[in-house]
Image: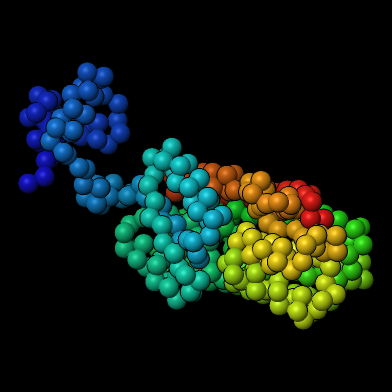
């Protein structure tokens, strides 16, 4: 039989009320705290959080739904989210929707059954109706990089315009005239913005050509194959802007196999490469997202929505860092 609060009370000689107060996070006298913690360790007591959730109407748990858990950047963001939520006394349930909208909806229903207090969603698509089921149940929702038109959720938005525009203008100043974009995934807000920036900047310069836009998968292989395909179809391409970390690694690998000293004739800008710049023989130019701040601010905003009912938006800026590939 698992140990109970009454067992702890007998072991410590304290009242059930004192034990309960400690377990629920209230302050107790230091001498009592030590007695309770020693008894918990000795008896192996585990708090019944499900029963507590029913009573308190709060599980102190946040549901996190991401489209793909296998990317490095997603893992880094999740690590920061979890660390920050711990500081507020919250745990997480994390699920991967595998870029499948129907599985995303199934995941929402699963998490609702677990009585999570709120949701952090990196959506598969930009469809604002995707989170309807959560809002219908009255659950606070924070959406990352999408659904700006919804006013009943909080948002973390990453501003791309300045950094991407700066990178493209740098390529143009370098004399590049056939600039390609490699992107991946559904057209959520961020992907749309990157394509819009690419289109607008190159149109203003009289250099836009739709055929130089390549869609691929969020993988190293995807970036590798997309870049090889681009150069095979259009050997005149003299610059690449790649919009994902894994794809950037694949594209760089393809360029290094393409020919030696390719950077003399081809410019390259990837994303989120700054932290790993030291592993490359040639330091790549990169647009870097504020990964740690994304995670921290995401956690803070969802806790504020859960505990205070406040829906707030946070905008964070990317940074363009010129390396040796431009």
Quadrant of the drawing holding the C terminus = bottom right
> For residue 307, which quarter of the picture?
top left
Drawn side of residue 326 relative to residue 28, left or right: right
Name the image quarter holding residue 191: bottom right
Residue 244 appears in the picture as rendered: no
> Can you give x and y, in whole percent of width and height, for residue 304 in the image?
49, 45
Q: Is residue 4 above or below residue 64?
A: above
- Give x and y (percent) for residue 159: 70, 54
Q: Judge by depth and name the residue closer to the eye, 268 or 119.
A: 268
Residue 113 position, x and y percent, is 31, 63
- Residue at image position (54%, 55%) is 72
**Residue 172 seen:** yes
Q: Which residue lies furthest to the front in this view?
A: 260
Identified at 57% across, 71% down, the residue is: 125
| Picture layout, residue 213 above or below residue 295 | below
Is residue 15 rendered to the left or right of residue 230?
left
The residue under the point 56% across, 54% down is: 73
Q: How many labels does the image show?
A: 0
**Residue in front for this viewpoint, 188 or 112:** 188
Colouring chosen for the image of the structure: rainbow
Image coordinates of residue 27 in percent, x first then y, are 30, 26
Q: In this view, does 309 lie above or below 12?
A: below
Viewer-proximal residue among 8 and 134: 8
Residue drawn at x 27%, y 36% is 24
């Amino acid at each position: 039989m698992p140990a109970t609060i009454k067992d702890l009370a007998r072991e410590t000689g304290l009242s059930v009320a004192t034990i309960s107060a400690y377990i629920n996070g209230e302050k107790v006298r230091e001498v009592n705290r030590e007695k309770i913690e020693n008894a918990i360790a000795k008896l192996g007591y585990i708090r019944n959080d499900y029963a507590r959730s029913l009573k308190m109407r709060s599980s102190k748990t946040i549901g996190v739904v991401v489209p793909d858990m296998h990317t490095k950047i997603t893992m880094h963001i999740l690590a920061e989210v979890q660390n920050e939520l711990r500081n507020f006394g919250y745990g997480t349930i994390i699920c991967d929707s595998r870029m499948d909208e129907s599985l995303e909806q199934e995941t929402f229903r699963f998490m609702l059954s677990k009585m999570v207090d709120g949701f952090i969603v990196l959506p598969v698509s930009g469809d604002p109706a995707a989170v309807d089921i959560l809002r219908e149940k009255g659950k606070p929702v924070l959406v990352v990089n999408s659904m700006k038109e919804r006013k009943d959720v909080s948002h973390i938005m990453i501003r791309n315009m300045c950094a991407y525009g700066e990178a493209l203008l740098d390529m143009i100043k370098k004399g590049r005239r056939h600039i390609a974009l490699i992107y991946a995934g559904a057209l959520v807000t961020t992907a749309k913005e990157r394509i819009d920036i690419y289109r607008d900047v190159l149109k203003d310069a009289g250099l836009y050509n739709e055929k130089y836009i390549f869609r691929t998968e969020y993988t190293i292989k995807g970036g590798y194959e997309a870049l090889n395909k681009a150069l095979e179809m259009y050997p005149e391409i003299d610059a690449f802007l790649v919009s994902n970390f894994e794809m950037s690694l694949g594209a760089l690998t393809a360029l290094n196999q393409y020919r030696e000293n390719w950077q003399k004739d081809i410019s390259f800008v990837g994303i989120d490469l700054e932290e790993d710049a030291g592993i490359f023989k040639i330091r790549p130019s990169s647009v870097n997202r504020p990964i740690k701040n994304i995670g921290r601010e995401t956690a803070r905003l969802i806790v504020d929505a859960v505990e205070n009912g406040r829906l707030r938006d946070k905008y964070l800026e990317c940074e363009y860092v010129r390396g040796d590939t431009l």
